[in-house]
Amino acid sequence: MVALLKIIEYAKNAFSMNMDELQTSLNSFSIWQAILWCYYPMAMLVALELLARSIDDDDDQDGGKMVPALQSYSA
């Protein structure tokens, strides 16, 4: 029980921030950093997609034919 009370007290102290500390932390983080922090993961995903599309692993460069066993049967 005492350990639980200590954890709750620690959580209250850890997440309490006065307005001066909040203002200081907001001033140290520029708007451009915030924008980049939001958009760079999406930019990385787009770059990976473009890279994956640029790798040409198509074995059928000459417009080959399907294996007859895999073609649909029409009676």
Image (cartoon, rainbow, N blue to C red):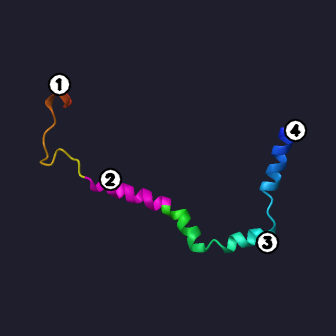
Query: Residue at 23% across / 52% down in the picture?
Result: 56
Question: Considering the numbered disc 1 on the image, is that residue within a helix, a strand or a loop?
Answer: loop
Amino acid type of the residue tagged 1 in the rendering: Ala
Camera-nearest label, 1 or 2:
2
Q: Residues within 10 Å of mark 1 (few under 14, many from 20)?
A: few
In the depicted view, which residue is nearer to us: 59 or 27? 27
Q: CA distance from mark 1 to mark 3?
A: 82 Å
Q: Is residue 34 left or right of residue 21?
A: left
State the quadrant of the N terminus: top right
Asked if residue 59 lies left or right of residue 48, the reply is left
Separation of disc 2 and disc 3 at Cα?
A: 48 Å
Hey, what amino acid is under mark 3?
Asp
N-terminal-most mark, 1 or 4 = 4
| Of callouts 3 and 4, the N-terminal one | 4
What number is the disc on residue 75? Answer: 1
Task: Residue 21 in the image: state x and y as whole percent.
Answer: 76, 69
The correct choice, above or below, for 66 with respect to 37 in the image is: above
3D distance between C-alphas at marks 1 and 4:
80 Å
